[in-house]
Image: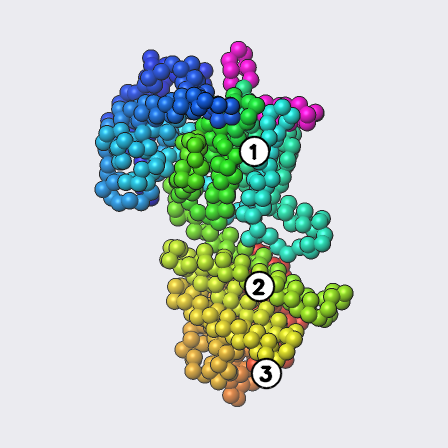
Amino acid sequence: MKTVTLELLRHGPAHNQLLSPLTQYLALCGNHPAVTVSAPFEHKQMSARLWDLGEYGFTDPDGSRKKRREQQLKDTAQIMGGILAGIPGLIAELAESTIEGDKLTHMRLILSASELALLPFELATAPNGFPGSGQALLLQSQLPLCITREVRRVNNEKVPWLGKQPRILFAAASPPGVGAIPLESHLLALRKVIDPWMRYYDESDPEALRRELDRHLVVRPQATVDQIQRACAGGDITHVHILAHGMAFSDAGDERFGLALHDARNPARVDVVDGVRLAALLRTPDRQGGISGPSVVTIASCESANQGAVLGAGASVAHAVHEAGVPLVVGSQFPLSFAASVLMVECLYEELLWGKDPRILLHDLRMQLKSRIRDTHDWASLVAYAALPPTLSRDLPETRFRQARRSINAALGRADKAINISSARVSRRSLSVGEEEQNADNLLNQAFAQIESAKERLKPAAFPRGQLVSVYGLLASTEKRQAEIMFRRSQFAANASQQTAYRNRSDESLQRSRQYYLEAFDADVSAVWAIVQYLVLTAVLDGPAAIDQKNDMRTTAWFLSERNLHHEDRKEVAWARGNLIELVLLDTLRTGADVQAATRQAEEHARQLNHSHERFEIYTTRRQILRYLEFFNERLPGLVGPAENIWETLTAGTPDDSTE
């Protein structure tokens, strides 16, 4: 993605200035000469334009308001296009992007002067010399373009939400007399986007559901400043979504705009919170003595039939929140329609949580707002402040990988629960056998459908070469765990035909797992664990004799594992011991092998692994050994005895959020 940077500067402090034709700004774009530009209207004139553009909620029986709004929309769009046309460097940069191809171009608009936040740059008509001349600049298809605003002082070295477990604070407010908000629609949309990471919970237990939801979504339906600050002070809120109306208030004789929240002492009263105050709530001292806060804030200022003075609320509040250090803030220049506010949640949050580039999402959202919602200019209302690191495109694949892994783990947990339902030892005896079978199959099918959806996001073509070993490893381990679940499910099948079907599905997953392990080793020949698991699954699928035909692989795995016993990283040493335990077990299958000596050797590696205190590596190895006792035991019965001794030798260990 090509990035074009346009910066507008002026002398003096960032605040306490008004728009004026007399105020000159220095425009810098790329390596081109600096030019001087100015706004062609006074501050009050711009405020009047914004008022007209925000009159969604007023009754208009003769259509006169709508006509005036449409005229102001067209006129303001041309004026904004004229401002951009006065910057030759910008024309040159965009023309160069057009020649290079039709991929999305990111236009960074750096605004240090706070009064420029009022200008609707996103509304601009493309002037002569720009791509799609005469069309809306952000809607033309000749050069797909995404504009983000930025304040120079915000650090863009890293984006803290990448790779973290997402946790969303949904703060909604609709005090009496302000107007209704689409609370339920937003809540349903947010509930849907977190579903791929929801672990199993007992649907008959409301408290269990509440606890699991709270891991991902914190809801404050009558939000106050105290509630927002307490939630953010915990330090684990990554995203904040605010649904509220904007409201005008007087500040030292100056009319400003804020968000209408509930008063902390009396929820029936209105507490109008401006951008600076909201930023102080979000960026708050945490329990560790630092400053915590979300990485993403979205502000939905909806239309109100009773109150039209929300003009500029989204933009100015978003500007202040971003200026306080929040990397990505999405707001609205004008009041959003109800439908647009819900669409914003659906389009942004689902893919943002999965690790899709936010610039692509913003462009897609703007196009959907234009095509799906009639009689509004919601598409032009969308404003995004973003301080994104230059390495974003390289960082996002890691987020996609981690989120896919978390989703798979959650689904596998539900699949394990399905097997427990099938087991006579743990099933609810109040249900008939048929009902138990149906419950288990429904839960299992839902879990596997989620796994398939997550695996679709792990297509190797979407990841850089250096990350392929991790991607193939996750796919391989997922298939192996699915195979184990299907094998366990077959043990409780209602009839022989069903049992055979489950066994066949298990074998198919094992075959895919074996192939993925081989591809992981091809992607990184130092990934000795991949070749060890390939050998194990070869013995399981093709019989112990097949190992004799893989001597080259076995020798390579043994050599690399023994070399890693001297690695400076203790974790690498622990993994090497786990590999050697399984290689020794496979060695006992060879003709003439000294089983007792091999078992003692494997037990010694297990004791040394215990002494390493690498608890996750111990947990993973012990889980793999358990497969020899409960999953591979029918096909490799000769390994049950040695595996039992190793199982008893290894301590329990500790899992993390990885897939073993």
Query: Which quarter of the picture shows residue 607?
Result: bottom right
| Element marked by disc 1 | strand
Outermost bottom residue:
592
Q: Are the two marked residues, 3 and 1, in contact with CB atoms closer than 8 angstroms? A: no
Residue 49 lies, in percent from the top left, at: 41, 19
Q: Nearer the viewer, mark 2 or mark 3?
A: 2
Separation of residues labelled 2 and 3 (CA atoms) = 34 Å
Q: Is residue 266 on the magenta stretch?
A: yes
At x 47% / y 54%, what residue is drawn? 401
Outermost front residue:
62
Identity of the amino acid at label 3? Answer: Gly
| Element marked by disc 3 | helix
Residue 595 lies, in percent from the top left, at: 58, 83
Separation of residues labelled 1 and 2 (CA atoms) = 36 Å
Identity of the amino acid at label 1? Answer: Leu
Q: Is the residue marked by circle 1 packed among few (<14), some (14-19), or many (20+) residues within 10 Å? A: many
Q: Is 410 left, or right, of 343 in this rendering?
A: right
Which span of residues is magenta-colored? 249-276
Identity of the amino acid at label 2? Answer: Asn
Q: Which residue is mark 2?
A: 445
Q: What numbered label is drawn on residue 243?
A: 1
Residue 510 lies, in percent from the top left, at: 50, 72
Q: Which residue is mark 3?
A: 638
Sequence-wise, the earlier of marks 1 and 2 is 1
